[in-house]
Image: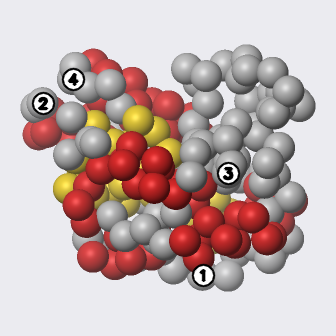
Amino acid sequence: MDIPALERELCRLPLAQYAFFPTDALVFSSRVRAVCEQECPRYGKTWSCPPAVGDLQVCIDRCRSYPQGLLIVSLGETKDASDFEKALKTRPTHEALTRQVAELLKKQGAAPFVLSAQSCDLCESCTCPDAPCRHPEQMFPCVESHGIVVPALAEKFGIDLSYGNNVIAWVSLLLFF
């Protein structure tokens, strides 16, 4: 992989920050998954969330099977970041950027495993758990679904996720060989 060429392409995108990292730097926690189960209304209702993504050990093994990763951050602005529905309206731009970065990795010969912000919302209603995913090649599991402690990874690689009250820092991880 030509990292300098990839970085030239990344610099052309409206990313706030990015960092390459070895996947052994990932920190996993069952507490992150517990939050999914206890607080997320999408738990058990989408293929991008637990339990559909597999148990925590399966997710850890899947992530660690890739030696490298790329953390990307984009920003969304809203009048009230505490209003979840308004905050979510800033997400589509991040998802489009995540897809662009995945394509850049593919052009470099990688087959990235992409974990993105929040649960998948490609379809108006998910087929989970009654039928297979309609778009498995486009669906990105949620970063938290894999139990990844994003703040620990960001801090380790100098990524600041604090931008102020009305700014949402959206994060995706792209793991690759």
- The image's mark for residue 1 is 2
Q: Is residue 114 left or right of residue 22?
A: right
Dot placed on the residue nearer the N-terminal end, 3 or 2 = 2
Kind of residue sitting beneath label 3? Pro
Label 2, label 4: how far apart the Cα atoms are: 6 Å
| Amino acid type at mark 4 | Gln
Earlier in the chain: of badge 1 and badge 4, it is: 4
Badge 2 element: loop
Q: CA distance from mark 1 to mark 2?
A: 36 Å
Q: Residue at x 80, y 70 (%)?
A: 39
Q: Nearer the viewer, residue 33 or 10?
A: 33
**CB-based contact (under 8 Å), mark 1 and mark 4:** no
Tell me which numbered mark, 3 or 1, is placed earlier along the sequence. Answer: 3
Mark 3 touches mark 4? (CB < 8 Å): no
Up/down of 14 relative to 24, above or below: above
Q: Which residue is mark 4?
A: 108
Pointer 1 residue: 164
39 versus 127 height, above or below: below
Q: CA distance from mark 1 to mark 4?
A: 35 Å
Q: Quadrant of residue 28?
A: bottom left
Asked if residue 29 can be seen in this view, the reply is: yes
Q: Residues within 10 Å of mark 3 (few under 14, many from 20)?
A: many
Q: Do labels 2 and 4 touch, CB within 8 Å?
A: yes
The residue that disc 3 covers is: 50
One can see residue 78 in this view: no
Instruction: Tell whether 10 sits left or right of 177.
Output: right
Q: Nearer the viewer, mark 3 or mark 1?
A: 3
Camera-nearest residue between 53 and 153: 53
Say whether disc 1 or disc 2 marks the residue closer to the N-terminus.
Answer: 2
